[in-house]
Image (spheres, rainbow, N blue to C red):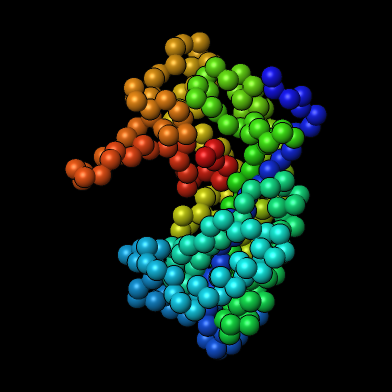
């Protein structure tokens, strides 16, 4: 039997993006020192067109800074789960393990403080401004948000058949209604001057608040509203929405087929189900 639920928690995992540059170069730019972003100068002839930074290895000096910061964060009770290059040159990201939202916010502020101090120690400068450089991707703070019971059950898990998971559907449509009713308030909460420079270009979503659910969940809700049978997205050998309903053929005989997630990210929506 399921244990009795006494409360519902909001959980959060904050993906923190940032730029890490040599401090000697940073000190040569008064605009960067004063405002956190460059105000003058020409675009470089080569930046992120080839995705070579994103798919390349992490530079040794940056890796040393990352590793030291992660160890310090672990001592402070903030275990980092992911580190990787981001799209723009000298842009990187880390993500901690999900936790209760109020604690996650505190830990994110602590993470930024530790990163800044460790970078300074290693003669580097970390930039948290959302758009420090024109023409390349800015740095977002992606908030992976969900709700769970006090026993750790994720209430936004669609499970194997979301169309028959009525509790999930009820919570999902309640969130849709809440975003529709209070979209202006949500928009206000992210409308900092620096974030306005980032939104609407270079993979950042527009400033209009919208929700993306993916093909499968959109079809489930549309079919319920229209009172018709639900279109079958699933392949016979794939039974969960987590694995997806379409298969990506990589055209290499020695590699297996890869299940594509139906709820993958959508760059035109700031509120996406993933």
The x, y position of residue 263, in whole percent, is 47, 36
* 44 horizontally vs 102: left or right: left
Q: Nearer the viewer, residue 105 or 256?
A: 256
Q: Nearer the viewer, residue 43 or 123?
A: 123
The x, y position of residue 166, in whole percent, is 61, 18
Query: Where, by quadrant of the figure, is residue 229 drawn?
Result: top left
Q: Nearer the viewer, residue 206 or 116?
A: 116
Above or below for 106 versus 64? above
Residue placed at 66% from the left, 63% from the top? 74
The x, y position of residue 103, in whole percent, is 75, 52
- In which quadrant of the rendered image does the N terminus lie? top right
Can residue 31 be seen in this snapshot? Answer: no
Residue farthest to the front, as pictured: 1
Above or below for 194 versus 213? below
Residue placed at 21% from the left, 45% from the top? 254
Query: Where, by quadrant of the figure, is residue 75 drawn?
Result: bottom right
Q: Nearer the viewer, residue 224 or 22?
A: 22
Residue placed at 48% from the left, 62% from the top? 84
Above or below for 228 versus 155? above
Query: Where, by quadrant of the figure, is residue 155 drawn?
Result: top right
Can residue 166 be seen in this snapshot? Answer: yes
Residue placed at 56% from the left, 46% from the top? 270
The x, y position of residue 146, in whole percent, is 64, 39
């Amino acid at each position: 039997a399921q244990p009795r639920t006494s409360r519902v928690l909001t959980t959060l995992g904050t993906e923190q993006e940032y730029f890490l540059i040599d401090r000697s170069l940073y000190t040569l730019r008064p605009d960067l020192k004063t405002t956190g972003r460059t105000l003058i100068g020409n675009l470089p002839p080569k930046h992120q067109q080839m995705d070579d930074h994103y798919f390349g290895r992490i530079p040794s000096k940056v890796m040393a800074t990352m590793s030291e910061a992660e160890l310090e964060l672990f001592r402070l009770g903030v275990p980092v789960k992911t580190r990787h290059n981001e799209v723009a040159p000298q842009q990187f990201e880390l993500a901690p393990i999900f936790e209760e939202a109020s604690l996650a916010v505190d830990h994110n502020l602590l993470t930024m403080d530790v990163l800044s101090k460790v970078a300074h120690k290693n003669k580097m400068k970390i930039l948290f401004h959302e758009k420090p450089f024109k023409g390349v991707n800015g740095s977002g703070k992606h908030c992976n948000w969900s709700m769970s019971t006090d026993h750790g059950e994720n209430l936004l898990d669609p499970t194997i058949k979301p169309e028959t998971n009525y509790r999930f559907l009820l919570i999902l449509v309640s969130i849709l209604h809440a975003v529709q009713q209070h979209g202006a308030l949500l928009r206000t909460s992210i409308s900092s001057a620096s974030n306005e420079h980032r939104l609407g270009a270079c993979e950042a979503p527009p400033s209009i608040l919208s929700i993306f659910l993916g093909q499968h969940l959109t079809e489930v809700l549309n079919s319920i509203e229209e009172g018709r049978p639900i279109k079958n997205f699933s392949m016979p050998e794939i039974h969960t929405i987590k694995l997806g309903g379409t298969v990506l053929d990589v055209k290499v005989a020695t590699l297996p087929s890869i299940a594509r997630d139906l709820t993958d990210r959508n760059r035109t929506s700031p509120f996406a189900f993933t």
